[in-house]
Protein backbone atom coordinates (compact mmCIF):
# COMPACT_ATOMS: atom_id res chain seq x y z
CA UNK A 1 0.00 0.00 0.00
CA UNK A 2 1.11 3.53 -0.69
CA UNK A 3 0.73 6.31 1.83
CA UNK A 4 1.32 10.01 1.47
CA UNK A 5 0.43 13.13 3.38
CA UNK A 6 -0.48 16.65 2.32
CA UNK A 7 -0.62 19.42 4.90
CA UNK A 8 -2.34 22.79 4.66
CA UNK A 9 -3.36 25.38 7.21
CA UNK A 10 -7.04 26.33 7.29
CA UNK A 11 -9.78 27.92 9.32
CA UNK A 12 -12.89 25.80 8.97
CA UNK A 13 -16.49 26.92 8.57
CA UNK A 14 -17.06 26.78 12.34
CA UNK A 15 -14.47 29.48 12.96
CA UNK A 16 -11.95 27.33 14.79
CA UNK A 17 -8.28 28.18 14.73
CA UNK A 18 -6.20 27.03 11.75
CA UNK A 19 -4.88 23.50 11.95
CA UNK A 20 -3.09 20.96 9.81
CA UNK A 21 -5.13 18.92 7.33
CA UNK A 22 -3.44 15.59 6.73
CA UNK A 23 -4.55 13.16 4.03
CA UNK A 24 -4.50 9.38 4.29
CA UNK A 25 -3.98 7.89 0.84
CA UNK A 26 -4.07 4.15 0.24
CA UNK A 27 -5.18 1.52 -2.18
CA UNK A 28 -7.00 -1.20 -0.23
CA UNK A 29 -8.18 -4.00 -2.53
CA UNK A 30 -10.60 -6.54 -1.08
CA UNK A 31 -10.58 -10.24 -1.94
CA UNK A 32 -13.90 -11.62 -3.19
CA UNK A 33 -14.44 -14.15 -0.41
CA UNK A 34 -18.10 -15.11 -0.21
CA UNK A 35 -19.06 -11.76 -1.83
CA UNK A 36 -18.01 -9.77 1.23
CA UNK A 37 -14.23 -10.03 1.34
CA UNK A 38 -11.03 -8.98 3.00
CA UNK A 39 -8.50 -6.40 1.86
CA UNK A 40 -5.00 -6.76 0.49
CA UNK A 41 -2.60 -4.05 -0.58
CA UNK A 42 -2.08 -2.89 -4.13
CA UNK A 43 -4.39 -2.83 -7.12
CA UNK A 44 -5.73 -0.23 -9.52
CA UNK A 45 -8.19 2.58 -8.90
CA UNK A 46 -11.87 1.63 -8.47
CA UNK A 47 -13.87 1.70 -11.72
CA UNK A 48 -17.39 0.51 -10.81
CA UNK A 49 -19.98 0.93 -8.09
CA UNK A 50 -20.40 -1.73 -5.41
CA UNK A 51 -23.60 -3.73 -5.39
CA UNK A 52 -25.55 -4.64 -2.23
CA UNK A 53 -27.30 -7.62 -3.81
CA UNK A 54 -26.55 -11.18 -2.66
CA UNK A 55 -24.82 -10.03 0.50
CA UNK A 56 -27.17 -11.96 2.77
CA UNK A 57 -25.55 -12.11 6.21
CA UNK A 58 -22.20 -10.91 4.88
CA UNK A 59 -20.50 -8.39 7.14
CA UNK A 60 -23.02 -8.83 9.97
CA UNK A 61 -21.88 -9.22 13.56
CA UNK A 62 -22.89 -11.93 16.03
CA UNK A 63 -22.01 -11.00 19.63
CA UNK A 64 -21.05 -13.76 22.06
CA UNK A 65 -20.71 -13.87 25.84
CA UNK A 66 -16.98 -13.28 26.48
CA UNK A 67 -15.20 -16.65 26.51
CA UNK A 68 -11.54 -17.52 26.98
CA UNK A 69 -10.35 -19.61 24.01
CA UNK A 70 -6.58 -19.47 24.51
CA UNK A 71 -4.26 -19.10 27.49
CA UNK A 72 -0.63 -20.14 27.18
CA UNK A 73 -0.51 -20.47 30.99
CA UNK A 74 -3.21 -23.14 30.93
CA UNK A 75 -2.43 -26.43 29.13
CA UNK A 76 -6.15 -27.05 28.67
CA UNK A 77 -6.38 -23.87 26.54
CA UNK A 78 -2.97 -24.06 24.89
CA UNK A 79 -3.17 -24.65 21.14
CA UNK A 80 0.06 -22.94 20.07
CA UNK A 81 1.87 -25.31 17.70
CA UNK A 82 5.21 -23.57 18.17
CA UNK A 83 5.35 -24.06 21.91
CA UNK A 84 3.83 -22.74 25.08
CA UNK A 85 5.74 -19.47 25.18
CA UNK A 86 6.90 -17.79 21.95
CA UNK A 87 10.42 -16.41 22.04
CA UNK A 88 12.13 -13.37 20.57
CA UNK A 89 14.00 -11.07 19.66
CA UNK A 90 13.62 -12.25 16.05
CA UNK A 91 9.88 -12.61 16.50
CA UNK A 92 7.89 -15.78 16.84
CA UNK A 93 4.56 -16.54 15.18
CA UNK A 94 2.01 -19.01 16.50
CA UNK A 95 -1.58 -19.77 15.55
CA UNK A 96 -4.70 -19.66 17.68
CA UNK A 97 -7.66 -21.79 16.55
CA UNK A 98 -10.89 -19.80 16.31
CA UNK A 99 -13.48 -21.95 14.56
CA UNK A 100 -15.79 -23.93 16.79
CA UNK A 101 -14.56 -22.23 19.97
CA UNK A 102 -16.46 -19.94 22.32
CA UNK A 103 -19.56 -19.94 20.12
CA UNK A 104 -17.83 -19.23 16.80
CA UNK A 105 -19.22 -21.53 14.06
CA UNK A 106 -17.06 -24.52 13.15
CA UNK A 107 -17.72 -24.07 9.42
CA UNK A 108 -15.03 -21.75 8.09
CA UNK A 109 -17.09 -20.79 5.04
CA UNK A 110 -19.45 -18.92 7.38
CA UNK A 111 -16.85 -16.90 9.31
CA UNK A 112 -15.32 -13.78 7.82
CA UNK A 113 -13.59 -12.61 11.00
CA UNK A 114 -13.60 -12.89 14.79
CA UNK A 115 -13.55 -10.19 17.46
CA UNK A 116 -11.07 -11.10 20.20
CA UNK A 117 -9.38 -9.47 23.17
CA UNK A 118 -5.65 -10.30 23.16
CA UNK A 119 -3.61 -9.91 26.35
CA UNK A 120 0.19 -9.88 26.59
CA UNK A 121 1.30 -11.19 30.01
CA UNK A 122 4.67 -10.48 31.64
CA UNK A 123 6.85 -9.88 28.55
CA UNK A 124 10.62 -9.77 29.09
CA UNK A 125 11.13 -6.29 27.69
CA UNK A 126 9.68 -3.58 25.45
CA UNK A 127 7.99 -4.83 22.29
CA UNK A 128 4.69 -5.62 20.67
CA UNK A 129 2.25 -8.28 19.53
CA UNK A 130 0.82 -8.19 16.02
CA UNK A 131 -2.15 -10.18 14.69
CA UNK A 132 -3.27 -11.31 11.23
CA UNK A 133 -5.11 -14.20 9.56
CA UNK A 134 -3.04 -17.38 9.57
CA UNK A 135 -1.03 -17.90 6.41
CA UNK A 136 -0.54 -14.18 5.79
CA UNK A 137 2.92 -12.64 5.73
CA UNK A 138 3.81 -9.78 8.05
CA UNK A 139 2.92 -6.37 6.66
CA UNK A 140 5.45 -3.74 5.65
CA UNK A 141 5.65 -1.46 7.53
CA UNK A 142 4.78 -3.75 10.44
CA UNK A 143 1.63 -3.10 12.44
CA UNK A 144 1.06 -3.66 16.14
CA UNK A 145 -1.93 -4.61 18.27
CA UNK A 146 -0.43 -4.64 21.79
CA UNK A 147 2.54 -2.50 22.86
CA UNK A 148 4.19 -3.29 26.19
CA UNK A 149 7.13 -2.82 28.51
CA UNK A 150 8.87 -5.43 30.65
CA UNK A 151 6.50 -7.20 33.02
CA UNK A 152 3.36 -5.50 31.70
CA UNK A 153 -0.12 -6.99 31.46
CA UNK A 154 -1.66 -5.31 28.36
CA UNK A 155 -4.92 -6.15 26.54
CA UNK A 156 -6.37 -4.91 23.26
CA UNK A 157 -9.34 -5.76 21.07
CA UNK A 158 -8.90 -6.97 17.48
CA UNK A 159 -11.09 -7.69 14.47
CA UNK A 160 -9.19 -10.33 12.51
CA UNK A 161 -9.94 -12.72 9.67
CA UNK A 162 -9.29 -16.44 9.93
CA UNK A 163 -7.03 -18.34 7.56
CA UNK A 164 -7.74 -21.56 5.65
CA UNK A 165 -6.95 -23.57 8.79
CA UNK A 166 -9.56 -21.66 10.82
CA UNK A 167 -6.97 -19.79 12.87
CA UNK A 168 -5.33 -16.40 13.24
CA UNK A 169 -1.65 -15.72 13.86
CA UNK A 170 -0.08 -13.76 16.71
CA UNK A 171 3.53 -12.60 16.50
CA UNK A 172 5.64 -11.58 19.48
CA UNK A 173 8.51 -9.12 18.91
CA UNK A 174 10.82 -7.82 21.64
CA UNK A 175 13.68 -6.23 19.71
CA UNK A 176 15.94 -5.41 22.65
CA UNK A 177 15.88 -8.58 24.72
CA UNK A 178 15.32 -12.31 24.20
CA UNK A 179 12.74 -14.05 26.31
CA UNK A 180 9.16 -15.22 26.45
CA UNK A 181 5.69 -13.85 27.13
CA UNK A 182 2.37 -15.49 27.84
CA UNK A 183 -0.65 -14.67 25.69
CA UNK A 184 -4.36 -14.84 26.57
CA UNK A 185 -7.24 -14.58 24.06
CA UNK A 186 -10.94 -14.01 24.82
CA UNK A 187 -13.53 -14.13 22.03
CA UNK A 188 -16.36 -11.56 21.99
CA UNK A 189 -18.09 -12.30 18.68
CA UNK A 190 -17.70 -13.04 14.99
CA UNK A 191 -18.56 -11.57 11.58
CA UNK A 192 -20.39 -13.67 8.99
CA UNK A 193 -19.76 -14.22 5.30
CA UNK A 194 -22.64 -13.89 2.85
CA UNK A 195 -22.98 -17.70 2.76
CA UNK A 196 -24.06 -17.92 6.40
CA UNK A 197 -27.68 -19.17 6.53
CA UNK A 198 -29.16 -16.56 8.90
CA UNK A 199 -32.82 -17.37 8.34
CA UNK A 200 -33.81 -15.67 11.60
CA UNK A 201 -32.04 -12.42 10.60
CA UNK A 202 -30.24 -12.50 13.92
CA UNK A 203 -27.06 -10.77 12.82
CA UNK A 204 -26.44 -7.15 13.70
CA UNK A 205 -24.88 -4.12 12.04
CA UNK A 206 -22.33 -1.71 13.52
CA UNK A 207 -23.92 1.72 13.88
CA UNK A 208 -21.35 4.37 14.90
CA UNK A 209 -22.54 6.90 17.47
CA UNK A 210 -21.07 9.74 19.49
CA UNK A 211 -18.48 9.40 20.91
CA UNK A 212 -20.04 10.38 24.21
CA UNK A 213 -19.61 9.69 27.92
CA UNK A 214 -22.27 7.73 29.82
CA UNK A 215 -20.40 6.97 33.07
CA UNK A 216 -17.70 8.62 35.18
CA UNK A 217 -17.59 7.45 38.79
CA UNK A 218 -15.27 10.38 39.63
CA UNK A 219 -18.04 12.93 39.06
CA UNK A 220 -21.58 13.60 40.25
CA UNK A 221 -23.01 14.46 43.65
CA UNK A 222 -21.26 11.54 45.40
CA UNK A 223 -18.20 10.31 43.46
CA UNK A 224 -17.39 6.78 44.55
CA UNK A 225 -14.85 4.26 43.20
CA UNK A 226 -15.82 0.64 42.71
CA UNK A 227 -14.37 -1.44 45.53
CA UNK A 228 -12.87 -4.91 45.61
CA UNK A 229 -15.27 -7.40 44.04
CA UNK A 230 -17.57 -4.48 43.26
CA UNK A 231 -20.31 -4.80 40.68
CA UNK A 232 -21.92 -1.95 38.77
CA UNK A 233 -24.80 -2.30 36.28
CA UNK A 234 -24.71 0.25 33.47
CA UNK A 235 -27.88 0.87 31.43
CA UNK A 236 -27.11 0.91 27.70
CA UNK A 237 -30.39 1.11 25.79
CA UNK A 238 -31.34 4.79 25.83
CA UNK A 239 -28.04 5.81 27.47
CA UNK A 240 -27.14 9.47 27.08
CA UNK A 241 -29.24 9.83 23.96
CA UNK A 242 -26.50 7.92 22.14
CA UNK A 243 -28.09 4.46 22.01
CA UNK A 244 -31.75 3.95 21.00
CA UNK A 245 -34.01 2.50 23.66
CA UNK A 246 -34.98 -0.39 21.41
CA UNK A 247 -34.79 -4.19 21.85
CA UNK A 248 -33.21 -4.42 18.38
CA UNK A 249 -29.99 -3.07 19.95
CA UNK A 250 -28.10 -6.25 20.87
CA UNK A 251 -24.60 -5.01 21.71
CA UNK A 252 -22.65 -1.85 22.38
CA UNK A 253 -19.20 -0.56 21.47
CA UNK A 254 -17.72 1.19 24.49
CA UNK A 255 -14.36 2.52 25.57
CA UNK A 256 -13.81 1.55 29.22
CA UNK A 257 -11.17 3.56 31.07
CA UNK A 258 -10.01 2.31 34.47
CA UNK A 259 -8.47 4.99 36.72
CA UNK A 260 -6.47 3.17 39.40
CA UNK A 261 -5.14 6.16 41.34
CA UNK A 262 -6.84 5.78 44.73
CA UNK A 263 -4.77 5.43 47.96
CA UNK A 264 -6.37 1.98 48.30
CA UNK A 265 -5.76 0.99 44.67
CA UNK A 266 -4.09 -2.35 43.95
CA UNK A 267 -3.18 -4.33 40.89
CA UNK A 268 -6.54 -5.38 39.51
CA UNK A 269 -8.62 -6.31 36.50
CA UNK A 270 -11.90 -4.95 35.17
CA UNK A 271 -14.47 -7.08 33.36
CA UNK A 272 -17.63 -6.18 31.46
CA UNK A 273 -20.27 -8.87 31.02
CA UNK A 274 -23.80 -8.92 29.58
CA UNK A 275 -25.28 -10.49 32.71
CA UNK A 276 -24.62 -9.85 36.41
CA UNK A 277 -21.76 -11.77 38.00
CA UNK A 278 -23.20 -13.88 40.84
CA UNK A 279 -22.10 -13.07 44.37
CA UNK A 280 -18.93 -14.90 45.37
CA UNK A 281 -17.95 -15.57 41.74
CA UNK A 282 -15.25 -13.85 39.68
CA UNK A 283 -15.62 -13.45 35.90
CA UNK A 284 -13.40 -15.71 33.80
CA UNK A 285 -12.48 -13.00 31.27
CA UNK A 286 -11.17 -9.45 31.58
CA UNK A 287 -11.28 -6.29 29.48
CA UNK A 288 -8.32 -4.55 31.07
CA UNK A 289 -5.62 -5.29 33.62
CA UNK A 290 -3.74 -2.61 35.50
CA UNK A 291 -1.33 -1.89 38.31
CA UNK A 292 -1.82 0.65 41.09
CA UNK A 293 -1.14 4.07 39.58
CA UNK A 294 -2.30 3.08 36.08
CA UNK A 295 -4.92 4.72 33.89
CA UNK A 296 -5.87 2.41 31.01
CA UNK A 297 -8.50 2.47 28.31
CA UNK A 298 -9.84 -0.60 26.52
CA UNK A 299 -12.49 -0.86 23.85
CA UNK A 300 -15.14 -3.58 24.21
CA UNK A 301 -17.91 -4.83 21.93
CA UNK A 302 -20.25 -6.18 24.54
CA UNK A 303 -23.60 -7.99 24.25
CA UNK A 304 -26.39 -6.26 26.15
CA UNK A 305 -28.14 -8.33 28.82
CA UNK A 306 -31.85 -8.99 29.16
CA UNK A 307 -32.06 -5.98 31.49
CA UNK A 308 -30.77 -3.63 28.76
CA UNK A 309 -27.47 -3.14 30.57
CA UNK A 310 -23.89 -4.34 30.75
CA UNK A 311 -22.31 -5.21 34.09
CA UNK A 312 -18.91 -3.96 35.27
CA UNK A 313 -16.72 -5.78 37.80
CA UNK A 314 -13.54 -4.76 39.64
CA UNK A 315 -11.22 -7.44 41.00
CA UNK A 316 -9.22 -5.80 43.82
CA UNK A 317 -8.70 -2.49 45.59
CA UNK A 318 -10.61 0.61 44.53
CA UNK A 319 -10.89 1.84 40.95
CA UNK A 320 -12.82 4.56 39.16
CA UNK A 321 -14.43 3.69 35.82
CA UNK A 322 -15.18 5.91 32.84
CA UNK A 323 -17.29 4.60 29.93
CA UNK A 324 -17.69 6.28 26.52
CA UNK A 325 -20.08 5.01 23.83
CA UNK A 326 -18.61 4.65 20.33
CA UNK A 327 -21.51 2.83 18.66
CA UNK A 328 -23.94 -0.04 18.94
CA UNK A 329 -25.04 -3.22 17.14
CA UNK A 330 -28.56 -3.33 15.71
CA UNK A 331 -30.59 -6.26 14.41
CA UNK A 332 -33.21 -6.11 11.67
CA UNK A 333 -31.46 -3.72 9.28
CA UNK A 334 -32.70 -4.14 5.70
CA UNK A 335 -30.80 -7.05 4.13
CA UNK A 336 -30.60 -5.16 0.82
CA UNK A 337 -28.73 -2.36 2.55
CA UNK A 338 -24.98 -2.16 3.17
CA UNK A 339 -25.51 0.03 6.27
CA UNK A 340 -23.39 -1.14 9.19
CA UNK A 341 -21.76 -4.13 7.46
CA UNK A 342 -18.22 -4.68 8.76
CA UNK A 343 -15.56 -5.62 6.20
CA UNK A 344 -12.20 -6.70 7.68
CA UNK A 345 -8.97 -6.03 5.83
CA UNK A 346 -6.94 -8.98 4.71
CA UNK A 347 -4.14 -7.76 6.97
CA UNK A 348 -3.94 -4.66 9.18
CA UNK A 349 -2.80 -1.52 7.32
CA UNK A 350 -0.77 1.34 8.77
CA UNK A 351 -2.74 4.43 7.79
CA UNK A 352 -0.45 7.02 9.37
CA UNK A 353 2.35 7.53 11.89
CA UNK A 354 3.11 11.10 12.90
CA UNK A 355 6.74 10.14 13.59
CA UNK A 356 7.32 9.46 9.88
CA UNK A 357 8.44 12.14 7.37
CA UNK A 358 5.49 11.28 5.11
CA UNK A 359 3.20 12.56 7.86
CA UNK A 360 5.22 15.57 8.92
CA UNK A 361 7.39 14.06 11.69
CA UNK A 362 5.46 16.34 14.03
CA UNK A 363 3.80 15.48 17.36
CA UNK A 364 0.46 16.97 18.36
CA UNK A 365 0.84 19.79 20.86
CA UNK A 366 -1.07 20.51 24.09
CA UNK A 367 -4.72 21.34 23.44
CA UNK A 368 -4.08 21.15 19.70
CA UNK A 369 -6.56 19.71 17.20
CA UNK A 370 -5.73 18.40 13.76
CA UNK A 371 -7.75 16.83 10.96
CA UNK A 372 -7.26 13.65 8.95
CA UNK A 373 -8.98 13.16 5.61
CA UNK A 374 -9.80 9.53 4.70
CA UNK A 375 -11.57 10.35 1.42
CA UNK A 376 -8.83 8.83 -0.76
CA UNK A 377 -8.66 5.75 1.44
CA UNK A 378 -12.45 5.25 1.33
CA UNK A 379 -12.47 5.56 -2.47
CA UNK A 380 -9.72 2.96 -2.79
CA UNK A 381 -11.29 0.13 -0.76
CA UNK A 382 -12.41 -2.26 -3.49
CA UNK A 383 -13.32 -5.79 -4.47
CA UNK A 384 -11.80 -7.53 -7.49
CA UNK A 385 -14.30 -7.91 -10.33
CA UNK A 386 -14.35 -9.20 -13.89
CA UNK A 387 -13.88 -5.65 -15.13
CA UNK A 388 -11.05 -4.78 -12.76
CA UNK A 389 -12.10 -3.62 -9.31
CA UNK A 390 -15.40 -2.68 -7.68
CA UNK A 391 -15.39 -0.13 -4.84
CA UNK A 392 -17.29 -0.92 -1.69
CA UNK A 393 -18.87 2.49 -1.79
CA UNK A 394 -19.74 4.89 1.04
CA UNK A 395 -18.40 4.11 4.50
CA UNK A 396 -19.36 5.45 7.92
CA UNK A 397 -16.36 4.51 10.06
CA UNK A 398 -13.24 2.41 10.46
CA UNK A 399 -12.03 0.05 13.15
CA UNK A 400 -8.39 0.67 13.88
CA UNK A 401 -5.75 0.35 16.54
CA UNK A 402 -4.75 3.79 17.78
CA UNK A 403 -1.37 4.06 19.55
CA UNK A 404 -0.01 7.05 21.45
CA UNK A 405 3.75 7.23 21.95
CA UNK A 406 6.67 9.55 22.63
CA UNK A 407 4.84 11.84 25.06
CA UNK A 408 7.02 14.89 25.63
CA UNK A 409 6.95 17.62 28.24
CA UNK A 410 5.89 21.10 27.21
CA UNK A 411 7.79 22.46 30.22
CA UNK A 412 11.04 20.50 30.79
CA UNK A 413 10.73 20.36 34.60
CA UNK A 414 7.03 19.48 34.72
CA UNK A 415 6.03 15.78 34.39
CA UNK A 416 3.11 15.19 32.09
CA UNK A 417 0.38 12.69 31.27
CA UNK A 418 -2.25 13.11 28.58
CA UNK A 419 -5.30 11.80 26.77
CA UNK A 420 -6.03 11.57 23.04
CA UNK A 421 -9.52 11.85 21.58
CA UNK A 422 -10.53 11.08 17.98
CA UNK A 423 -13.88 12.42 16.77
CA UNK A 424 -15.81 13.01 13.52
CA UNK A 425 -15.20 16.18 11.56
CA UNK A 426 -18.76 17.50 11.88
CA UNK A 427 -18.63 18.05 15.65
CA UNK A 428 -18.33 21.71 16.60
CA UNK A 429 -16.06 20.94 19.56
CA UNK A 430 -14.16 17.92 20.86
CA UNK A 431 -16.53 15.65 22.79
CA UNK A 432 -16.22 14.68 26.45
CA UNK A 433 -14.65 11.30 25.62
CA UNK A 434 -11.21 9.79 25.14
CA UNK A 435 -9.55 6.95 23.25
CA UNK A 436 -6.17 6.79 24.98
CA UNK A 437 -4.48 7.79 28.23
CA UNK A 438 -0.70 8.07 27.97
CA UNK A 439 2.08 8.56 30.53
CA UNK A 440 5.71 9.46 29.85
CA UNK A 441 7.83 6.60 28.51
CA UNK A 442 4.81 4.57 27.37
CA UNK A 443 3.48 3.38 24.02
CA UNK A 444 -0.24 2.83 24.61
CA UNK A 445 -2.53 1.00 22.13
CA UNK A 446 -6.32 0.83 22.01
CA UNK A 447 -8.68 -0.42 19.32
CA UNK A 448 -11.11 2.34 18.37
CA UNK A 449 -14.20 2.82 16.23
CA UNK A 450 -13.55 6.10 14.42
CA UNK A 451 -16.64 7.67 12.88
CA UNK A 452 -16.23 9.85 9.80
CA UNK A 453 -17.84 13.27 9.60
CA UNK A 454 -18.04 16.00 6.97
CA UNK A 455 -15.85 19.07 7.13
CA UNK A 456 -16.25 21.55 4.30
CA UNK A 457 -16.51 19.55 1.07
CA UNK A 458 -14.83 16.46 2.54
CA UNK A 459 -17.21 13.79 3.89
CA UNK A 460 -14.57 11.57 5.48
CA UNK A 461 -12.77 13.57 8.17
CA UNK A 462 -11.60 12.37 11.58
CA UNK A 463 -10.09 14.87 14.01
CA UNK A 464 -7.67 14.38 16.88
CA UNK A 465 -7.16 16.41 20.05
CA UNK A 466 -4.31 15.99 22.55
CA UNK A 467 -4.74 17.06 26.15
CA UNK A 468 -1.24 17.88 27.43
CA UNK A 469 2.39 17.75 26.38
CA UNK A 470 3.41 16.77 22.86
CA UNK A 471 2.26 13.38 21.57
CA UNK A 472 2.97 11.22 18.54
CA UNK A 473 0.24 8.83 17.47
CA UNK A 474 -0.34 6.21 14.79
CA UNK A 475 -3.27 4.26 13.37
CA UNK A 476 -3.47 0.71 12.01
CA UNK A 477 -6.76 0.00 10.19
CA UNK A 478 -8.32 -3.45 10.72
CA UNK A 479 -11.79 -3.09 9.16
CA UNK A 480 -14.19 -0.64 7.55
CA UNK A 481 -17.89 -0.06 8.31
CA UNK A 482 -20.19 0.53 5.34
CA UNK A 483 -22.85 3.25 5.14
Image (spheres, rainbow, N blue to C red):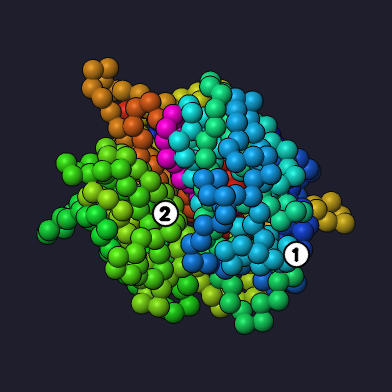
Badge 2 crowding class, 10 Å Cα cut-off, few under 14, some 14 to 19, many 20 or more, is: many
Quarter residue 142 falls in: top right
Residue 14 place in picture, x, y as percent? 37, 47
- Residues at marks 2 and 1 touching, judged by CB atoms closer than 8 Å: no
Q: Which residue is mark 1?
A: 109
Q: Is residue 150 left or right of residue 411?
A: right
Quarter residue 291 falls in: top left
Q: Is residue 336 above or below residue 50?
A: below
> Which residue is at 33% across, 56% downward?
323
Residue 458 place in picture, x, y as percent? 54, 48
Q: Which residue is mark 2?
A: 286
- Check residue 158 for magenta coloring: yes
Residue 352 place in picture, x, y as percent? 56, 35
Quarter residue 44 falls in: top right
The local secondary structure at tag 2 comes to: loop
View extreme (top): residue = 412
Which labelled disc corresponds to residue 425?
none
View extreme (left): residue = 221
View extreme (bottom): residue = 200
> Which residue is at 28% across, 63% downward?
231
Q: Is residue 346 left or right of residue 276?
A: right
- The segment highlighted magenta reads 148-159
Quadrant containing the N terminus in the rendered view: top right
The main secondary structure of the magenta stretch is strand
Q: Is residue 429 left or right of residue 385?
A: left
Query: Of the residues under marks 2 and 1, which one precedes in the sequence?
Result: 1
Amino acid sequence: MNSSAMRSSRRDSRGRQPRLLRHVTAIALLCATAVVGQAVGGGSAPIAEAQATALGAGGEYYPLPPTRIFDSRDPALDSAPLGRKPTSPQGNVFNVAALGRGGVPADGSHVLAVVVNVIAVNPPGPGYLSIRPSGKAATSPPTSLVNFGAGDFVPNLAVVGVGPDGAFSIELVTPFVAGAADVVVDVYGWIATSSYPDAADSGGRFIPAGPGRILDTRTGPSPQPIGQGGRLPLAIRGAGGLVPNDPSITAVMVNITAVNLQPSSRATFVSATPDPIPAGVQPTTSNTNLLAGDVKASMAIMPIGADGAIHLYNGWGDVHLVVDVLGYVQRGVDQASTRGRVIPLDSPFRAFDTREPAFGSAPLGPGAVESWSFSDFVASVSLPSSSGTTPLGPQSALLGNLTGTGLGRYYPTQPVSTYLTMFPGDLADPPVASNLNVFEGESVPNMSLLRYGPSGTDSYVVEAVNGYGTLHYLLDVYAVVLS
